Structure formats: structure tokens, C-alpha cells
Amino acid sequence: MIDRYRWYELVLIYAGILLVLAFLLAPFLEAFMVSLRPLEMIFRIPYRFFTDDMSFSAYVSMWSSVPDLPLYIFNSFFIAVSVTVLALACIIPAAYAVSRFTFFGRDAILAAFLGINMIGAAVLIIPLYKLMLAAGLLNTYLAMIIPGAAFSVPTGIFLMRSYFLRIPRELEEAAYVDGAGRLYTLWRVILPVSLPGIMVVAITTFIAAYAQQFLFALTFNAVDEYNPLPMGLYQFFGRERVLWNELMAASLTGILPVLLVYLFLQRHIVAGLTSGAVKE
């Protein structure tokens, strides 16, 4: 492959890759450097990237500044996993239905899903609050899980529908000839072949659910026991000062569960792509 490119083309390719990586990783690098600095050195001018008094003390002191930080990280992880499971339970049958069946109003339903994607959660927060109040779900995990899953379903249906459309119908027809029913075919034939697509939807849903919990938690939850990580990070903001170094340390620590889940699901995506799929 290397022989196909001239040396200056390779230089441009790698320069472009490094530029994109630098752009993507710059916020994380700056957050890490802030977490290593003493509080009084963070905004000192002139700015120095490296200083002699850097340490990991913020990674130790953040646990005493916000004692419930482990609980908040667990809550965020639990809510994100629950949102992903609930969303997939809705996305898979809905996406299969709109990809395999022709029924009245199908195009209108797809257009409605597309329109829902354009509506932000902040616009619907008051009606959602009234629904949660009427259902008695305020101050519970479900008050954050159900809205999170609801806002993930439209995007997930579009992603899974496009993946179902790529699966040859001959796979299902062969199962029907062998006497399999519709649900059995979906469970034993279609879903294994669709595993890479399901993993992609699971990853995007989990990351979105993990990162977008602040609004729902602030509106629907007043019990500290159920608060997710964003509400814990908010406690580093004091009236007189902000503990920026501990805030950055806690933020980077809170990212670790997402990285672990991403690495775990990425391995399954590769396994799904290389096994079991039958293409024409």
C-alpha cells in the first residue's frame, strides 16, 4: 500500500491525521495539565505549559471535597447502561418493522422521527416535568432513564433501519423455508448478523446518555442519592471560588467508565464484523 503513494503524499496524510488528533485531544490535554497545577497557578500570566509545582494532589483531594463522588460516577454509569438497554429494546423492533414492512403512514412516522431529532430536550422539559410528576417518578432513577431513552430512540431507529436494509432478505426467506417464525428469525438470524450495527447504536446511546444527564437530573431529581456525575461536578463550583484543578481531575476520572465501555464494545464490533455475516 505504501508503494502506491509518493513521499510527499504520505507526509500530507500523516500531517492531516496529526492535525485532527491534536484538535481532538487538545481539550483533554489542557484539562489534564490544569488538574496537575495548584489552584493559584492555573490562571497565572504569562502562561507556562509546564511548571515545577505540578502534582497529582488534586486527584487525592477531590474525594474529600466531594465525598459522594464515587456514588455519582456509579449513578451516571447505571443510568447510561439503563438508558442504553431500554433504548435498544425499543429501537430494534421498531427499526426492523419500518425496514421490512410496508404499512400506511410509514413515511410519515419516519419523518416524525426525523423531526423529533431536531427538538432539544430543553424545549420539552416543562411538559416532561408534568408527566413525571403525574406518574410519580420524580426523585427516582426512572425520571432520568425514561427521558434519556426517549430522546435516543429516533436516532437509533434511523441507524438500525439503514443496517437492517443492508441484510439480504434471502436470509429470512431461507429461515422461513425451514419453518422458522418471524420472531424466531429475528432473534436467531437477523440479530446475530446485525450485531455490529447494534453495538454502534449501543455505543452512541451510552455516550450520549452519560454526557447529557445534567438537565434531567437538575429538573427531575432533588435527592442526592440519585444524582449523576454532572451534579457532583457542579459541587466544585463554590460561591467564592471554583476548584478548577479538582474539577478537571474529577471530570477526567469520570470519563474512565465511558472509555472502558467503548473499548469493550469496540472489540465486540470487530468480532461481529468478522464472524457470522453472509453477504451476497
Image (cartoon, grey):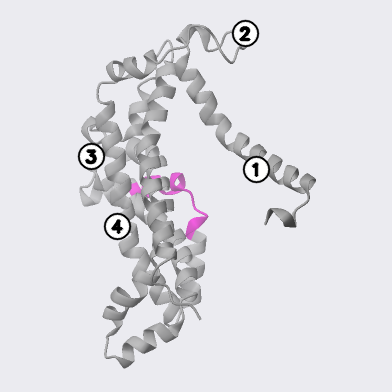
State how far apart marks 3 and 1 are (Cα): 46 Å
Residue at 51%, 61% in the rendered image: 115
Mark 2 to mark 3 CA distance (whole Å): 45 Å
Task: Name the mark nearer the viewer: 1 or 4.
Answer: 1
Q: Earlier in the sequence, mark 3 or mark 4?
A: 4
Residue kind at label 2, given as amino acid type: Ile
Q: Which residue is mark 4?
A: 86
Residue 24, compared with residue 238, is above or below; it is below
**Residue 177 drawn in magenta:** no
Residue 139 is tagged as: 3
**Residue at (37, 57) in percent of width and height:** 268
Give the SS element for disc 2. loop
In this orientation, which residue lies closer to the viewer: 32 or 183? Answer: 32
Q: Earlier in the sequence, mark 2 or mark 4?
A: 2
According to the picture, the residue beneath numbered tag 2 turns out to be 45
- Mark 1 lies on a secondary structure that is helix
Query: Marks 3 and 1: which is nearer the front?
Result: 1
In the picture, measured across the screen, residue 107 lies left or right of residue 133, that is right
Please, what is the three-letter code of the amino acid marked with disc 4?
Leu
How many other residues sit within 10 Å of disc 4, few (<14), some (14-19) or many (≥20)? some
Q: Residue at x 42, y 47 (%)?
A: 208
What residue span does the magenta drawing correspond to?
116-128
Q: Are marks 2 and 3 in contact (CB under 8 Å)?
A: no
Near mark 3 (Cα within 10 A), the count class, few <14, some 14-19 or many ≥20, is many
- The image position of residue 109, as x and y in percent, is 46, 71
Query: Separation of disc 1 and disc 2 at Cα?
Result: 32 Å
Q: Nearer the viewer, mark 1 or mark 2?
A: 1
Q: Which residue is mark 1?
A: 17
